[in-house]
Amino acid sequence: MSVHGMNVNDKSAARGRRMMPRAFRAKTMPAALAAVEKALGTRALIVSVHPIPAGPSWQLWRRSGIEVVAMPSAVDALYSDPDEPASAGEVQEAQSTREDQGGIPSPAAIPGGASGKPEVKTAPGSETKPAASAPPSLPHALALAHDHLKSEGVDPVWLSQIMQTIRDGSNDRILGDEGLSRELVRQELLRRLRSDGGTCLIRRKVIFLIGPSGCGKTSACAKIASYAMRALGKQVHWISSDTTRAGAIAKAQAFTAPLGIPLHLTYRPEELPSLLRRDSESEISLVDTPGCNPYRKAELGELDALMAQIPDRHILWVAPATAKESDLREMYAAYSHLGIGGVVITRLDETRSLGELFNFLHQSQLPVAFLSHGPRIQGDLHTGETSLLVNHLMGEKPF
Ligand SMILES: Nc1nc2c(ncn2[C@@H]2O[C@H](COP(=O)(O)OP(=O)(O)O)[C@@H](O)[C@H]2O)c(=O)[nH]1
Ligand SMILES: [Mg+2]
């Protein structure tokens, strides 16, 4: 028997195809879920949710996307008309929800200016009680995530904005599901952080590591050198301008000798240009600098003099995850005139609360270049996988 040009076998095959899981991709979780709902109805079953890189391969930090795999509920598939063509599973949002991130804002450009706090926009007529600071009446799953992140130290104003964004983009069914709600929170946190996706080693030939003493510059230099050699096949040159502190040269030798890296020492800023190697595509120069106290003008002046020698440099600021948000802000304010290209976050193994770090990274929009979670040269370094920071922040997967 044939109905509308289809026989019974064709119809059941069409229904079978409709029951197959389908992938829906979008830049944000709410957009992907909206596409699922549009194509498969409100009773669709979510099979899996995971992040995907959505930017071009050399600009992974620019965008991340989300893939939701879903299938229709058996009831919808049984009673739907198999003659009706299925709508496209892949969706792309027309507008990016992120700002263009071509430039790194200076501290003055951070929302809220020097105070570093975000601007709170109030609805007309509600000026006396800003919505962002009102205690949110949230669905249970969101309330749990909210309370956890608040106890981690995430700025309550940012947190209210995140929760509001999720509520605005979701329906009661999604918000009633604890797993989906957590995933929405994770995606919103992730969207607020910026990563350089490890591209600085590909794009840049001269990389400086700067920061206060003891933050992990020399160790980070060794970890990055080892990663660049092993994973990217780079030929690394290590230049150390930390030549006066007791034991500094011996430490540089202890790192470079086992890795087989040539070590160059520079005692005066003018010597630096002749030590750098830019001849071939595969060569990079890592410059390890002495600790610079952001509150001491003389030390900042020495760093300025060193940097002035190399205009086409890339500066990575090594910042410990254990620092307070106010310290991070002060340090960034002191170094930012040098043009910080990215941040290496160290000591992630020595803290269990990342809320203040998240606030700072969110405000500054500094690209995360590397993450270090231990003193080992191999195994304790990750490229700028901000999802690891978010997992840590959500209390799910400490390093
Ligand atoms: N636990 C932990 N220790 C680290 C990490 N990075 C560096 N260290 C240790 O911190 C100490 C100071 O590191 P160093 O690289 O010499 O700091 P620098 O003064 O900034 O060059 C050393 O004992 C390192 O082994 C990290 O991510 N986690
Ligand atoms: Mg050092």
Image (cartoon, grey):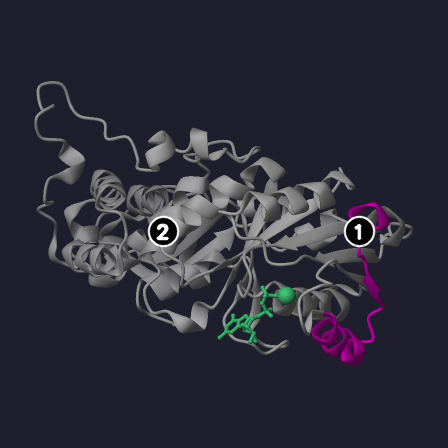
CA neighbours of label 2 inside 10 A, class few (<14), some (14 to 19), many (20+): many
Residue 89, can we see it?
Answer: no
Q: Quadrant of ligand 1?
A: bottom right
Q: Image quarter for residue 285?
A: bottom right
Viewer-side label of 1, 2 = 1
Question: What residue would you read off at disc 2?
Answer: 325
Q: Report whether the residue tagged 1 is closer than 8 Å to ligand 2.
A: no
User: 148 or 88, which is in the foreground?
Assistant: 148
Question: What residue would you read off at disc 1?
Answer: 268
- Asked if the stretch drawn in magenta spans residue 144, the answer is no
Part of the protein shown in magenta: 249-271
Residue type at mark 1 is Arg
User: 138 or 146, which is in the foreground?
Assistant: 146
Q: Image quarter for residue 392?
A: bottom left
Q: Are marks 1 and 2 in contact (CB under 8 Å)?
A: no
Image location of residue 250, percent across then percent down: 74, 76
Image location of residue 211, percent across then percent down: 56, 55
Image vertical order of residue 62 relative to residue 266, above or below: above
Left or right, 321 with reference to 42: right
Q: Say which residue appears at 42% left-offset and 55% top-offset.
A: 22
Image location of residue 160, percent across then percent down: 21, 43
